[in-house]
Amino acid sequence: MKLYINRIIMLEKNYYGNSLQDWGISLLIIAGGVVLCQIILLVNRMVIQRITKRSKIRYDAIFFKTVEKPVLWSILLAAGWVACKRLEMDGSLRVFLMQSCRVLAVLNVTWFIARFAVAVVEESLFRGKKTRQKETLVHPHLFPLVRRTLLILIWVIGGVTALGEAGIKVGSLWGTLGIGGIALALAAQDTVKNILGGVTIFIDRPFRIGDVILFDAVEGTVEDIGLRSTRIRTYDKRLVVIPNYKLTDVSVMNITSEPARRVVVTLGLTYDTRYEQMKNALTLLGHIPQTVPEVNEKDLAATFSEYGDSALQITFIYFIRKQADIRETISNVNFEILRSFGEAGLNFAFPTQTVYLEGNRKETGV
């Protein structure tokens, strides 16, 4: 009996303004919050997330996955708030703890919004379409910029709101941020122009990495598209770095996107070529796709175009298939023309001039 009374007295004895029983109950509240977190974590991962994975709605799975940790921290904060509120403590300490709980609650909500917003943007614009083996709505290289911008915006709003909960007047802070943003924008005009140019390239996609483009007499392969500049490797293996805003202000020719390469060849036959031979020459040009398969048999054009100063001019237009080697195909076509015209007895002309002498009527070829 005496021992029981001593235990009761010990429980009722004050420690830092609270009995041992009150301290124990507060600790049990925090421990209960921890246990509840483990139960929610287990149910979410073993039941809810397995159900949402089979759902046709993608965003419910994103929600339950991103809300998991913020909910756990909310339970711990709520348990800590209840445990502290029921204890007797100094007024200033109580105010500090209550403000700290409100600030942490605002930051926790901001954390959830940031996680959920980034996951939704990634799923909607970048990952979702790709998983169904289609092109993404926005170029994947744009995601780091979108993610960083979104996180900065959300955390700035959440941080300022948390400062307001801490008792700090945020009206002047918003004004300072606005003035600072204007000053920063004015100081970084070129950088902003390049970033906006990079965003335009990522969204419009006039060209991609690996494409051959022609820009202001610079022709080469695109090696990298950054937020500030684009790197092009020219045919002489030199690396050219072009600011993005320049690529959005002028015309850029995407050579890779062409369905076929158009080639125009001008041939000159000697003036002693007969009518039948000229017709045969056009027929031979029309049969070139049969011997050079890289040449598209459609859209061929071979015409007797004009009477030149020293030759009968033939204009031959053909298209090289997209996947073919352009230089090799042109060479093969030229070889085939040389072979077939030679076998048909067709002679190519070269620049000549005939001089008539009035005295003895002799003709001299120069």
Image: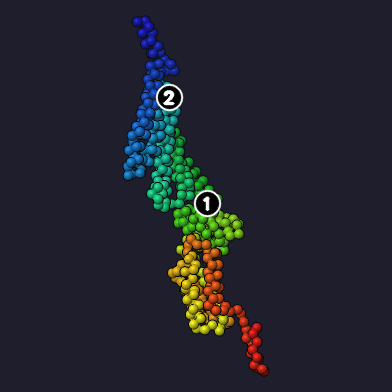
Q: Label 2, on which residue? A: 91
Q: Label 1, on which residue? A: 226
Residue with the most extreme right position: 359
Residue with the most extreme bottom position: 359
Which type of secondary structure does the marked residue at label 1 adopt?
Answer: loop
Are the residues at dot 2 and dot 1 in contact (C-beta closer than 8 Å)?
A: no
Residue at point 48%, 61% (across, down): 323
Residue type highlighted by circle 2: Gly
Residue nearest the viewer, comparing 137 with 243: 137
Q: Earlier in the sequence, mark 2 or mark 1?
A: 2
Classify 258 as above or below 363: above
Distance from the alpha carbon under mark 2 to that under mark 1: 55 Å
Residue type highlighted by circle 1: Gly
| Mark 2 closeness class: few <14, some 14–19, many ≥20 residues within 10 Å | few
Residue at point 52%, 53% (across, down): 225
| Mark 1 closeness class: few <14, some 14–19, many ≥20 residues within 10 Å | some
